[in-house]
Each structure stands twice: as C-alpha cells, then as structure tokens.
Image: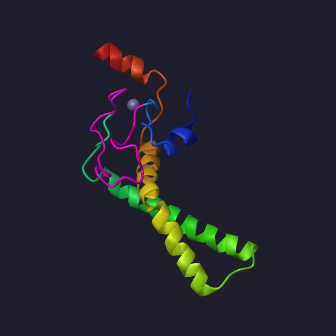
C-alpha cells in the first residue's frame, strides 16, 4: 500500500494512490501546467469535486509559503549569516524555486484531506467499467 505522505508528495490520486492528479508530470514545464484530468484514470475518482473546490488549496499554499520563509530564517540563524537584505533575497529565490511545486502539492494536500484512501478503488472501478 503506497504511503499517504509519499502519494501526496508525488501528486497522486488520494483515493487509489496510483493515478496522477496532473496531466503534466514535469513540475517546471509551463505548458499545460494547471491541467488536471477530470477523473482519475485508474479509479475514476472525480478531481473536480465542485466548482471552486481548489480555492481551499490557497490556504495550504499560504501555510507552505510561511513554512519555507521560517525554514530560510532558521537556516540563516543557525549558520549565523542573518542580515535582512540576504534574508529577503534568499526568501525570494526559495519561493520562486518552489512555487510550481507548492502550487501542485497544495492541491494534492487539499484533495487528500477530502478524499479517503480506498485500497479497493481500482478494483471497484474496473468492475463498473
Ligand atoms: Zn485514483
């Protein structure tokens, strides 16, 4: 059984943990970046649960952004290199570098909070089809 955290980080369907949440698997490729399939291609789970479902993912990405800023601050503090200028520059670089992944993983976390894992999801879907 795939681990919940791993499946979230790998942007997998929360129900079967095998199907992909995003059409485009390359995080840093711009084309088709926002595209998600309507349904999981493995278990048929609906990915567009309701209109505006992913607005909630903004709160997740906000929390992740704060976590990144805190991590940068902590690292600078630990290495005793803190200056406000360097802090702002490193924050900006860290946030820009992680932005595409933060966007996707926020949606992955959000949908995983709403959909329960079903180890038999794929089996059930195949029987229906
Ligand atoms: Zn699935």
Residue 45 magenta-drawn?
no
What residue is rendered at 26% in x and 38% in y?
38
74 versus 16 height, above or below:
below
Observer-nearest of 71 and 59: 71
Figure quarter occupied by ligand 1: top left
User: What coloring was used for the rendering?
Assistant: rainbow
What residue is rendered at 38% in x and 18% in y?
124
- The secondary structure that dominates the magenta segment is loop
On the picture, is 62 further left or further right than 36?
Answer: right
The stretch of residues the image draws in magenta is 19-44
107 versus 119 height, above or below:
below
- Quadrant location of the N terminus in the rendered image: top right
What residue is rendered at 34% in x and 32% in y?
40
Q: Position of residue 61 (x, y in %)?
A: 45, 60
10 versus 27 height, above or below:
above
Q: Tell me the quarter of the picture where residue 90 sits.
A: bottom right
Q: Position of residue 47 (x, y in %)?
A: 32, 40
Q: Position of residue 57 (x, y in %)?
A: 40, 56
Q: Residue furthest left?
A: 51
103 versus 66 height, above or below:
above
On the picture, is 4 further left or further right than 11?
Answer: right
């Amino acid at each position: 059984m795939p681990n919940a955290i791993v499946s979230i980080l790998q942007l997998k369907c929360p129900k079967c943990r095998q199907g992909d949440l995003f059409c485009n698997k390359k995080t840093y490729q711009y084309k088709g970046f926002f595209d998600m399939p309507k349904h999981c291609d493995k278990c048929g789970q609906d990915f567009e649960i309701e209109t505006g479902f992913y607005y909630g993912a903004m709160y997740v990405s906000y929390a992740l952004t704060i976590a990144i800023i805190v991590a940068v601050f902590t690292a600078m503090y630990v290495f005793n290199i803190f200056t406000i200028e360097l802090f702002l520059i490193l924050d900006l670089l860290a946030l820009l570098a992680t932005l595409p992944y933060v966007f996707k993983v926020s949606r992955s976390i959000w949908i995983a909070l709403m959909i329960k894992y079903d180890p038999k999801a794929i089996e059930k879907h195949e029987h229906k089809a």
